[in-house]
Image (cartoon, helix red, strand yellow):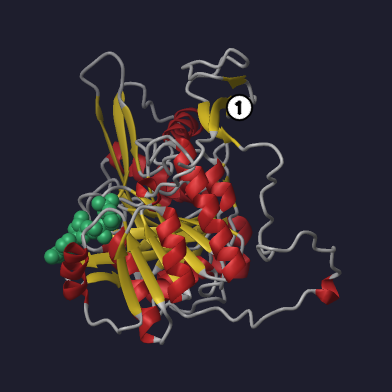
Amino acid sequence: MAVKMKTVFFCQECGYESSKWMGQCPGCKQWNTMVEETVKPAGKAPKGIGTAPDTKYVSPKTLNEIVMEDEERADTHIGELNRVLGGGLVRGSLILVGGDPGIGKSTLLLQVAGFLSGDKKEVLYISGEESLRQIKLRANRIGDFSDTLKFMCETNLSNIEEAVIRTKPEVIIIDSIQTMYNENVSSAPGSVSQVRESTSVLLRIAKSMNITVFIVGHVTKEGQVAGPRVLEHMVDTVLYFEGDRHASYRILRAVKNRFGSTNEIGVFEMRERGLQEVLNPSEFMLEGRPENASGSIVTCSVEGTRPILLEIQALVCHTNFGFPRRQANGTDYNRVNLLMAVLEKRIGLSLGDFDAYVNLAGGMKIAEPSLDLAICLALISSFKNRPIADDIIAFGEVGLSGEVRSVSMAENRVQEAAKLGFKTCIVPKALAGKLKTCASSIEIIGVSSVADAMDILK
Ligand SMILES: Nc1ncnc2c1ncn2[C@@H]1O[C@H](COP(=O)(O)OP(=O)(O)OP(=O)(O)O)[C@@H](O)[C@H]1O
Ligand SMILES: [Mg+2]
């Protein structure tokens, strides 16, 4: 029988050690920070990443001595995913994909597996959650798959390692890490130490055999990948799949990427035949805009290198209670409060007796300061009940004195607006001169304060 390893509990914040679990750490008084960890028997140092299993000592190398293999990135044939990964799949990398239940993680990875196997790459899809029949049902819906894609229902990591050694795939997909278990750890699958130990086994497999590993991770109620934060440190790339339960589109966002930028997003739509890329998110976000309604204006946010037009809606109405309600959907609540204080003090709007609701139509979540000007204009428009023309967009950061400050990548924003047929663009005055030439079909109006911008109200 295998010798069970000893486990102790460590505080993730201060490192306090205890033999039993406690809700509050006696060391730093933080709650819920104790996690179980295994104590390895002395004398067995863990092997380093990328070393052959039987080498005892590897001498340090100079940069010139490190042999670079062909570092070409594999094309996943899903443009939006390539973009988020920083230009394609890097061989031997570990990619964690997190997301709410039912958001489409398995669907996305099955599609990736399909495309990669179409390129004659050996792919092994390991599911610990679904039966082979369930996977086949989904696969039938999505399309045709080549024979280089193989499936396996398995949760025991030593069996998985065995299968990997025998089949030598180039890409492995683990769905999900919370169902995997390592026999050396006594706690149940999904527990903190199992998740960590399992990931470290996968890390070793990925780096020593140069295999790309996708790991699906469930998220907690707070929206973080279940398990310790350390999981995110172990992998090369962390992708979050998010989206509104009620909308069909999904956003893939990189929160960590060792091989590319973390600002990029990919936009998908869930359809009968799987996830489809949304090539023009602006059009998608502006679908169904109300005409001639007060409290609505379009703005442009930049995610990574890509501008996206969004509709900002505000509703300001008399409060029926002593204490006015404020609500922000899709943007920062505190920022909205701050902007309302600016409007009250600098423009003299007495918003004290009014409830205010601000909403980013389409369910996107963006906390970029460039949205400030549009939020202010939407609030004023709703307060005064005067609509703003449909072909105007506005962007700019608003400071505490009500001044409009410049933002980055203004040209891209104006060009995106011109592309979708907008006629007027309200921009910070500091940028107006520079932007005059960037699109001929659009009129640029520079404003130095929110009060200046109010002229656009009908
Ligand atoms: N026939 C269908 N037509 C359109 N969409 C479908 C269809 N069948 C399933 N879906 C969508 O696929 C989603 C499930 O996708 P998937 O199983 O990939 O999610 P997941 O993130 O892997 O979920 P889990 O956390 O349970 O593993 C459903 O929520 C639904 O929106
Ligand atoms: Mg799934």
The residue located at (64%, 83%) in the rendering is 70
Residue 279 versus residue 328 in the image, above or below: below
Quadrant housing residue 90: bottom right
Question: Is residue 443 visible to the viewer in this orientation of the structure?
Answer: no
Q: Residues within 10 Å of mark 1 (few under 14, many from 20)?
A: some
Farthest residue in the front direction? 1
The residue located at (21%, 74%) in the rendering is 142
Q: Position of residue 223 (x, y in %)?
A: 39, 41
Quadrant housing residue 355: top left
Q: Position of residue 348 (x, y in %)?
A: 44, 29
Relative to 65, 306 lies left or right: left
Quadrant housing residue 11: top right
Which residue, given by chain and number where applicable, does mark 1 sit on?
13
Quadrant of the displayed image that contains ligand 2 = bottom left
Decide which of 130, 386 is in the foreground and name it: 130
Q: Position of residue 23 (x, y in %)?
A: 46, 17
Residue 403 versus residue 325 in the image, above or below: below
Q: Position of residue 285 (x, y in %)?
A: 30, 61
Question: Is residue 136 visible to the viewer in this orientation of the structure?
Answer: yes
Quarter of the image where the N terminus is located: top left
Element on which disc 1 rests: loop
Relative to 345, 136 lies left or right: left
Q: Amino acid at mark 1?
A: Glu
The residue located at (50%, 79%) in the rendering is 74
Task: Respond yes or no on whether mark 1 lies under 8 Å from ligand 1.
Answer: no
The residue located at (64%, 37%) in the rendering is 41
Decide which of 380, 197 is in the foreground and name it: 197
